[in-house]
């Protein structure tokens, strides 16, 4: 059994989508990291510039440290109007000269003597970016290290980071969509050889088991080679099966024919009454075995031809007439009136001559052996736009409740009369292979029982 699976195209498309999504997520993360770094670097330069200007404004007057904060330092930081600015100037004694005295009071300022120190901090419940710069004073009245602390809220930084990240996300999404579309087109194009291989196999004649010839990619060559190897083995098995059926038909029918001849050659005058009963039973069983063997071989032949023979334009009237002549023996009971009737000289259908003839022969034989008492009629015509072969007899018929039963293999209502239960089964196999069906018409007091073989008419557009 073949389990239902998603298509190869869907699986490839899904995997490519997952890979592209993972790559897009990495690129967006990288864009966010880059955006944050770029925003920090930009605003850190402004923050450092303002702090250096404030440090440069420190001077000593009358032995005291004073600061004249330049307006340009605040204008520089004012480029981010949504942010607030906090500053603090610390003299050589560690005291706040001006600004916010509680700003970053816990910091070790000595680290700024080597180079400016940047810190992320929180001031009055708001995240800030802080820079600490130092200036050494060497005037005799006053010497030592002074420090300048400048802090700025991070709203502008976050906004710039989001802007850079958003643009990067838009670009990544656009490129990912284009890449996905291009990949899907490439996958679809790459899978065309598989589609071509499937179409080539589906268009093949059932009897054509020659190797497939297709310019396939290297990846498909093992698959193509396996198909050709399987078809080669299947061809060998079909030949062996046909040979076996032919040999079986010959090997089985020959001794059965010889056995029947030997029974007929017995001199009944030399056989006791009890022996005559035994001889009659042997003759009956031999005939039943011969009939069963023929029907089994016929059934095997019908099944084989249904899958290997193409339907052609054939004359159903001619086929039915040949089947009628084959099925009605020369020694038929003279009390039975047999007849053949066709509504028109020719009736064209799409069929296999051998299989149709075998099906009709079995239906007529069934009616003759197990149905008709004084009447058997075969009629070929058209009913409801379909070709129909009707076999009618005046026997007891088959009850409607048993119709579904008798069309199954080895199922019969006449087992006591030597029926094998294969006649209707063969006819059903043939009808199904021809797109038709086997039906029954119930026996009524004013009507005989009928078996109907119905198949489609030949359509001229098939030509």
Image: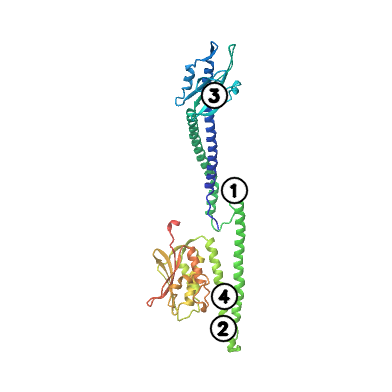
Task: Please say if the residues under marks 2 and 4 sit with CB atoms less than 8 Å apart.
Answer: no
Can you tell which mark lies on residue 131?
3
Say which label, 2 or 4, has the lower sequence index. 2
Label 4, label 1: how far apart the Cα atoms are: 51 Å
Q: Nearer the viewer, mark 4 or mark 1?
A: 1
Label 3, label 2: how far apart the Cα atoms are: 123 Å
Label 1, label 2: how far apart the Cα atoms are: 66 Å
Quadrant that contains the C terminus: bottom left
Q: Secondary structure at mark 4?
A: helix
Say which label, 4 or 3, has the lower sequence index. 3
Return the residue at label 4: 290
Say which label, 3 or 1, has the lower sequence index. 3
Q: Secondary structure at mark 1?
A: helix
Q: Is residue 55 above or below residue 331?
A: above
Q: Who is closer to the viewer here, 49 or 305?
A: 49
Q: Is residue 203 visible?
A: no
Can you tell which mark lies on residue 220?
1
Q: Nearer the viewer, mark 3 or mark 1?
A: 3
Q: Who is closer to the viewer here, 282 or 360?
A: 282
Answer with the quarter of the image where residue 400 lies: bottom left
Disc 2 crowd rating (10 Å Cα; few below 14, some 14-19, many 20+) is few
Q: Who is closer to the viewer here, 306 or 396?
A: 396
Q: Nearer the viewer, mark 1 or mark 2?
A: 1
Can you tell which mark lies on residue 178?
none
Residue at image position (57%, 75%) is: 290
Disc 1 crowd rating (10 Å Cα; few below 14, some 14-19, many 20+) is some
Q: Secondary structure at mark 2?
A: helix
* Residue that protrudes farthest toward the left in the picture: 446
Residue 449 point in image, percent of width and height: 42, 74
């Amino acid at each position: 059994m073949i389990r239902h699976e998603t298509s190869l195209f869907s699986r490839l498309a899904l995997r490519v989508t997952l890979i592209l999504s993972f790559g897009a997520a990495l690129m967006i993360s990288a864009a966010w990291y880059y955006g944050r770094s770029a925003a920090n670097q930009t605003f850190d330069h402004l923050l450092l510039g303002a702090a250096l200007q404030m440090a440069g404004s420190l001077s000593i007057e009358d032995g005291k440290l004073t600061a004249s904060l330049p307006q340009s330092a605040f204008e520089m930081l004012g480029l981010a109007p949504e942010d607030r600015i906090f500053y603090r100037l610390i003299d050589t004694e560690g005291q706040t000269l001006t600004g916010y005295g509680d700003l970053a009071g816990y910091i070790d300022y000595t680290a700024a003597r080597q180079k400016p120190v940047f810190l992320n901090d929180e001031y009055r419940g708001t995240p800030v970016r802080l820079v600490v710069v130092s200036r050494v004073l060497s005037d005799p009245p006053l010497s030592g290290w002074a420090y300048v602390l400048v802090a700025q809220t991070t709203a502008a930084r976050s906004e710039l980071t989001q802007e850079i990240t958003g643009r990067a996300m838009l670009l990544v999404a656009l490129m990912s969509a284009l890449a996905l579309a291009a990949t899907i087109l490439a996958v679809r194009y790459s899978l065309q050889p598989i589609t071509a291989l499937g179409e080539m196999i589906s268009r093949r004649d059932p009897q054509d088991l020659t190797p497939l010839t297709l310019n396939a990619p290297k990846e498909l060559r093992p698959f193509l080679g396996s198909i050709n190897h399987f078809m080669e083995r299947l061809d060998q098995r079909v030949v062996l099966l046909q040979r076996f059926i032919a040999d079986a038909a010959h090997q089985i029918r020959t001794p059965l024919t010889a056995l029947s001849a030997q029974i007929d050659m017995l001199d009944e005058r030399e056989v006791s009454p009890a022996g005559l009963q035994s001889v009659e039973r042997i003759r009956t069983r031999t005939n039943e075995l011969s009939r069963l063997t023929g029907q089994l071989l016929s059934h095997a032949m019908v099944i084989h031809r249904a899958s290997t023979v193409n339907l052609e334009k054939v004359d159903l009237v001619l086929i039915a007439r040949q089947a009628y002549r084959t099925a009605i023996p020369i020694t038929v009971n003279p009390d039975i009136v047999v007849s053949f009737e066709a509504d028109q000289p020719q009736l064209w259908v799409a069929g296999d001559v051998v299989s149709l003839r075998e099906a009709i022969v079995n239906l007529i034989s069934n009616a003759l052996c197990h149905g008709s008492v004084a009447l058997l009629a075969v009629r070929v015509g058209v009913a409801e736009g379909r070709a129909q072969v009707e076999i009618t007899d005046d026997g007891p018929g088959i009850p409607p409740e048993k119709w579904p039963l008798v069309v199954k293999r080895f199922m019969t209502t006449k087992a006591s009369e030597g029926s094998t239960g294969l006649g209707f089964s063969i006819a059903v196999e043939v009808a199904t292979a021809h797109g038709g069906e086997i039906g029954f018409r119930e026996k009524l007091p004013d009507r005989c029982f009928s078996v109907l073989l119905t198949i489609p008419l030949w359509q001229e557009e098939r030509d």
